[in-house]
Amino acid sequence: MAAPLVRACGFCAVKLQRGGWCSKYVLISTNTFAFTIVRPTTVSPQSKPSPRKNDPKQWVGVVGLEIHAQIHSNTKLFSGARVQFSAPPNSLVSFFDASLPGTLPVINRRCVEAAVMTSLALNCSINKKSLFDRKHYFYADLPAGYQITQHRLPIAVNGSLSYSHLVGQKWNQAVVKTVRIKQIQLEQDSGKSLHDDTRKQTLIDLNRAGVALMEIVMEPDMSCGEEAAAAVRELQLILQALGTCQGNMAEGQLRVDANISVHQPGDPLGVRTEVKNINSARFLAKAIDFEIQRQIDVLVNGGVVHNETRTFDFKLGQTIPMRDKESLQDYRFIPEPNLPPLIVYDNESTPVNADPQQVINIDLIRKNLPELPSAKRTRLVDQYGILPEHSFVLVSEDGLTEYFVSVLQETKAEPKKVIGWVIKELLALLKHYSLTVSQSHISPSSLAELLNLLEMGVISSPAAKQVFLLMWKECDKSPQQIVKEQDLGLVQNEKILEEICQNVLDGHLEEVAAIKKGNKRVLNKLIGLVQKEMKGRADPIMVKTLLERKIS
């Protein structure tokens, strides 16, 4: 229901247009049920706003992130209920998840190990003693009326994440930036509310209730959407490399809340808004950039930015308000009475004769950390001589690095040639058909065999691309079989090539004249025409030699 266009000032009864003012008060917000009125500020000639305040270019964005990463575990954080995406509603709910009386939490060892591993990878200080708290709020899909989290003393603090942010169009313009990590805490997820607009009812699915989350809180060290998206993508790769979170944002395994404000350099930080539950790095960048611009527009036009929670509507490409921001007091934090302090150890503090199954050793977990994405990219560049941008592509696609290395082990081709085939040809087909590397129709061995045929001069580069496409369609055939069946072997018969070259020259006299006048680049066109006649099977070096001989 739209708000009326005319309101009366609640203090002096003067009729007001929406957003207008009387001599004493200003109407700054209005809706169907209420409106807010404040005294206007009298602006004297000496106190007029600085032109700098009205210049949108003078404002800068400030962005902090709260990331909820679902821990990759077979069971939930405090119960033995299984974790499975898209299971039938309410089929994976224990008595504890449903908050039945008399049930008690029992912590999942795997989840604690995952939190410690993630904290180490993000350069955090591990708290050997951490505490659990109850965070009270009412949601229909939170049966207990509170969430078990770590508010007072989280499992890890004071970390950092380095990421590459592309400031231009080329990779040599990438800048390495670092965002500070305030803390990492363990907590429960809530259930899921399913809204049926047709029947005007809400259904509750508690399958997700109690699933283990790591909340990773990043300091407001970023200034735009692309920086935040780059940081989230790097975090996603780290979590996947560790195996602590699968990082599938489409399935809600990685959800981002963005805290956004704007201010002018040298001024205090502005009032922030929170954009909730963004499940795509691309949408994250769009939501942040829109919200920064929205806040700048509000302030430049003399408005006020409200501390509120908003959501991103990807269809409209804009953020929309959800509710006023809840203050800390609303949550009524209290210590969790049913869980003792969480204690982890290092080599020096581990109790003598302690049962290894009952002790989590920080140093042992650190020793077994896998190679992290940044280290892997550096190694690929140093070991194989590939470009840094190629190393980013290899590491960003799950399984692509292993595919690339497997091809190298079976081919005589140089790494720089192999990387071109893997990224430009194979990855392009995978993207086109929305497949993962593990679903590729072409195995590393088959691609290596094709590259060996190319290296030995059995086929030309254009013919190799034809064979590659046929290998994708006919998975059961080897490159050698396809070359033989399709007669795609390299033609090196000088008599045949000489006849084709002469026919091409006879049909393109203008190009021949241009070459004789010194335009050597036109020769490439003639070589391409010969290859077209030969279906890509002609030896390009021999073709070039024959054409040059005939033209001269």
Image (spheres, helix red, strand yellow):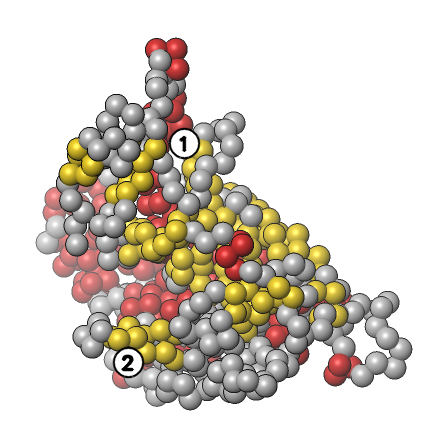
Residue in the foreground of this view, choosing between 279 and 540: 279
Quadrant housing the N terminus: bottom left
Question: Which label's residue is closer to the chain start, 1 or 2?
Answer: 1
Residue 260 screen position, x and y as percent: 43, 45
Up/down of 533 relative to 162, above or below:
below
- In the image, is 124 to the left or to the right of 487? right
Three-letter amino acid code at the position of disc 1: Trp
Residue in the foreground of this view, choosing between 191 and 333: 333
Query: Pointer 2: what residue?
Result: 473
Residue drawn where x is 15% and y is 40% of the image: 5
Residue drawn where x is 26% and y is 66% of the image: 536
Whether residue 54 appears in this view of the structure is yes
Q: Secondary structure at mark 1?
A: loop
Question: Dot 2: few (<14), some (14–19), or many (≥20) neighbours within 10 Å?
Answer: few
Residue drawn where x is 43% and y is 80% of the image: 206
Three-letter amino acid code at the position of disc 2: Lys
The residue lying furthest to the top in this view is: 46
Query: Pointer 1: what residue?
Result: 59
Residue 505 screen position, x and y as percent: 16, 53
